[in-house]
Amino acid sequence: MPKYKTKGLDCWNKAKELRDRYYRDYKESHERGGLRWEGGAWSFDAIPQALEGEVHGLSEEPYGASIGHIPELQVRYQEAAEGKWGCARDLCSYMRAYWGSVALNEYAFGGEWPHADFIFQNQICCCHSKWLQVADEIDGGTTPYFCFDVGAGPYDKIGDRQIEDVVGQLYDGIEFIQKVTGRKIVDEKLIQNVYNTYRSNCYWAKTCELNQAIPAPLDEKTMFSLYVLGTLEKSNQAIADFYEKELYPEVKDRVADKIAAVADERCRVLGDSQPPWGFLRIYRYLEQYGIVSVASLYTFSLIGWMLVDKKGDIVPYPTLEEQGITIKDRDHALRLLAEGELKGKLMWAPFYGANYKNDLVTKIAKQWRCDAAIIHLNRGCEGTAQHQMQLKIALQEMGIPVLTFEGNMADEREFDEGRVMRLIELFVTETLGLKKVA
């Protein structure tokens, strides 16, 4: 008999519907007189989404991940980027997939590549500022381009000066958007978008916090499909409502009722970096041994805002309502937006050194009661894969067994499934001493 009850999420179909609508709206926006813009998953989408009229964005990393989920498509797009554009194979595989899609004039969700009206990008990872600039050159080189720098320092070094610097850039971004589109930023929309951004980021963090429970209500494979909504459009009312009013309450109920992601949970695993998207079945293989992947810095804080409290614990960033804050005007909205991103996005801290990653991930391992770690040495993303071997040592010093395997999040040519499955089998059976659940 299974140890725990289990069932799928009731809100699962709603999540799929929101994702499908996002990509469909971007494609069809011009047909309805709307605008289209391109940017990163970490871009401040609350700003372009506050323009007059209908406007839809395409965030680059989730689009690359969608391509990466389909091995035959990702290889064709990677080869197009390498052959038609001549890019190197050691560049970000999301970026290469994106470039290949543009080079072939194909939209992964059907039809020709939908040209953007402007680009509103941010710079934190090494390739961000050039990603869409090159994509536009492949596409003809006529799209107005703006990029702002959020490399203001790690979360514990953020003060008024750093926030002021980013706010100033956001004002420049507003001036740019209004000039190239001929439309105005509507302050009422901007303010609501900032409220929504806080709700999306904070309630995803609250949902991740619930995964400390035993049994874990969510497995990481499922969480990958849930955090993605925030990477698409954090400021979207429907997405913010989904996180606050549907996902979080349902997962809270699962904890109360001891409904498990894996019915025979007996081993809790920590992950790191993006998975090889075309081979998520490795998580289902782990479940045969009662193993559930419950946590990772990547999955939690790619969009989730968190902070380290006075006790040294990682906790969700407070919503504006919890802080007792009412947004007054445009300036207040932009400052709150910059402050939340700079202080709450712990995922940015490892860009400033291995000590940050080691500190945050070892805290996660302890709080989420992880028994082991499986680290994907991801050749496809230099940003999330930084300091992984230092992290391995830090976890081992805690007494946590660690398996590392080489691969690529969106390029199957650099992932040997047979070898990885054999490594996992040996780790599970020999190191962890587990047998398949009868």
Image: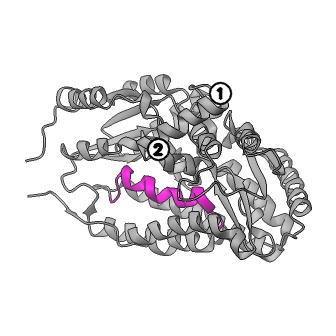
Element carrying mark 2? helix
Identify residue for label 2: 73
Say which amino acid is labelled 1.
Answer: Gly
Q: Range of the magenta residues?
A: 217-235
Q: What residue lies at 50% left-to-right and 39% top-to-bottom?
A: 76
Classified by dominant secondary structure, the portion drawn in magenta counts as: helix
- Quadrant housing the N terminus: bottom left
Q: Residue at x 37, y 25 (%)?
A: 396
* SS class, disc 1: loop
Classify residue 435 as left or right of residue 256.
Answer: left
**Quadrant of the rendered image containing residue 180:** bottom right
Q: Nearer the viewer, residue 265 or 131?
A: 131
- For label 1, the residue is 86
The location of residue 236, given as percent across then percent down, is: 63, 69
- Residue 177 seen in render: yes
Q: Can you say whether 411 is above or below 260 in the image?
A: above
Q: Residue 398's x, y, as percent?
A: 38, 29
Picture residue at 64% right of the left edge, 54% below the top: 113
- Residue 129 percent across, percent down from the top left: 75, 39
Amino acid type indicated by mark 2: Leu
- Is residue 308 something one can see in this rendering? no
Q: Quadrant of residue 25?
A: bottom right
Q: Is residue 304 above or below residue 191?
A: above
